[in-house]
Amino acid sequence: MAADARVSEDDLRAFVGRALRATGMRSADAEMVADGMVWADLRGIDPHGVAKLPLCVARFQAGGSQPDAEPTVVEESGTTAVLDACGAWGQVAGARAMAIAVDKAGRERLGAVVVRDSSSLGALGYYPLIAVRRGQIGLMITNSMPLLAPWGGAARLLGNQAYAIGCPAGRHPPLLLDTSNSATTWGHVKGVLERGESLPAGLALDRDGRPTVDPAAALEALLQPVGGHKGSGLALMWEVLTGVLAGLAFGPRVGSPETIGQRQQVSHFALAIDPSAFLPRDQFTERVDSLIDQVRSVPPAPGFERVYAPGERGFLLTAERTRTGIPLPEHRLAELCALADHLGVDRPRRSTTIRAAG
Amino acid sequence: MAADARVSEDDLRAFVGRALRATGMRSADAEMVADGMVWADLRGIDPHGVAKLPLCVARFQAGGSQPDAEPTVVEESGTTAVLDACGAWGQVAGARAMAIAVDKAGRERLGAVVVRDSSSLGALGYYPLIAVRRGQIGLMITNSMPLLAPWGGAARLLGNQAYAIGCPAGRHPPLLLDTSNSATTWGHVKGVLERGESLPAGLALDRDGRPTVDPAAALEALLQPVGGHKGSGLALMWEVLTGVLAGLAFGPRVGSPETIGQRQQVSHFALAIDPSAFLPRDQFTERVDSLIDQVRSVPPAPGFERVYAPGERGFLLTAERTRTGIPLPEHRLAELCALADHLGVDRPRRSTTIRAAG
């Protein structure tokens, strides 16, 4: 395996920030998006990390997303809001939406914000942590371009509707579920195709809606929902809370990020819950800690070293990458350097090169 | 296949009501529970229908649940409440919780109620419909006795954490997802064992946490979560919103309904969302109708006649059973008649007998 370059998280964050400012994004938004992308890289969620920056910049330059959009609250109550992202990059709109939900939950115990006219959120887990830092439970849902058929169907109608739930703990890192309703990702299917392998059963359907293990047949057709009708049903209900409630595109009308000149009209739903409405805060976090202790002490099944709580591995990897830097394949670093030159900003700085494990 | 008896929904509801009143349950609660059980039978969710009545009565008589418990709000804000079920039958507490959440959402746009010291809710889909009848979106979650290991583990820690989400439509019946986080149910595994068959792959684990297709090995061990870590993660987050927030038992301490002399300490979470906080009501229901139309018009995959929206088949079966009566296996009807005699109330009335299809 080729050696990866390493870039420190601080340097990578600074690079993403100056690249985004060069596109016309306000400083505070650029810092927030940089933080969100590097957060994903720290946790090993590479497709949602700096790997997305070139697409983000391309969308700004082609006019499909607006670097300087000012997301605006267009409907509001004490507990709820509709945030019109006005074509902003999704991470800007998503973070603002969760912050509004958290403010409302701080006053009213619950807060919910629906976002319209947005784009991709990147790694969903970033947003519930905005609630967790305020001692709240956060849920973030996004719809996406259609990838799934409703159960029993043979045509794309629903996104995989990624969602994340975060919950504060006491001694332990927060619980953080970051997941979706598809049985796998396009990235996984593409990787299988590139390696000339077959897919495991149960992950994809061909054009006629038949289960397939052929990654090429899958790529032109459908991912399977998690658990058949269960994942399909949840994906549909998440469409109600996002695209339907947001009042613009839903279902098959939600656009692809790759169509860089067009608004995607992605919608999100952010919910914040103040646990102290139900239980004194210390008791709550002690009980979460106890649940995490119980999870970790479950005897592992064959093939597993130990049992992890949701999100735990991401926090462990973050600690490691904070020390050792973020590994970037050479082709990725070269792409980012070319982007820096194109935007007229300083390139990211390589900190050291370590041969990748394995 | 043996012929089923048929009982009309009205007669069955009346029978369940008088049986429950005979145990000491207040009339309004008895009518509500009867409605909930018969609702499940109308939709073909037999294990949560009148099949549960003997267990319910047994729990009352053994003292594990209280027929005349008065669920009491012990913490409250404008948007939230904690409802202490005081050992009530779960359906009584669950319906009250959702009604409180709906009242709060009627005033504040959002409402959430956590229930402690409850028991089994029966069919989860019943509760969101309390919100749907008021034009709201409802989510109901329950924890349960442990059935699942957290992903990678080999010991029971989490319930299958059934949940249901309902959403009002306009021309169409509501959307109603009624699901859980286990890949199958104990009832299914027991049926496979009785028929001397093997389980499909991916449904269960044996005592050591190894995948098994042997139903006997599964029964003494573990169900698999839906989608591996995905279902396991959601089951854990649902435990946070139920058992952890409710302040009593959580995880492995939640009791079995079959231990009839002991409190189960089941917890629930009810959330109601007023969609008109985000979008005018008519626009919202028109958009839900449009989404349902799109789902129904997706071309079916091989082996499927057509694509159904979540909950649609249950509404269709309800319409049929409202006309033809509810089919009950003879052994079930005999059991209910014996229960009637035991409680000193009139037996359920057989309306007609039709040879079951197949």
Image (cartoon, coloured by chain):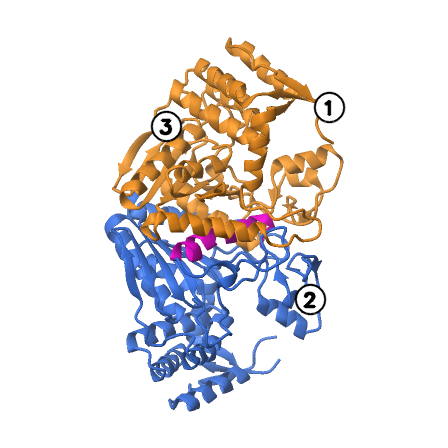
Chain colours: A orange, B blue
* Residue underneath mark 1: A2
**In the rendered image, residues at marks 3 and 2 fall on the same chain:** no
* Residue underneath mark 3: A86
Horizontal placement of B226 versus A240: left or right? Answer: right
**In the rendered image, residues at marks 1 and 3 fall on the same chain:** yes
Q: Residue at x 50, y 21 (%)?
A: A13
Q: Position of residue B223 (x, y in %)?
A: 61, 61
Helix, strand or loop at disc 1? loop
Helix, strand or loop at disc 3? loop
Give the chain letter at badge 1. A
| Mark 1 neighbour density, 10 Å: few (under 14) some (14–19) many (20 or more) | few
Q: Position of residue A352 (x, y in %)?
A: 64, 18
Which three-letter amino acid code belongs to the residue tagged 1?
A: Ala
* Residue underneath mark 2: B217
Position of residue B90 relative to residue A190, above or below, is: below
Residue B9 or residue B245, whichever sits in front: B245
The disc label shown at residue B277, or none: none
Q: Can residue B42 be seen by looking at this rendering? A: yes
Residue B306 or residue A85, whichever sits in front: A85
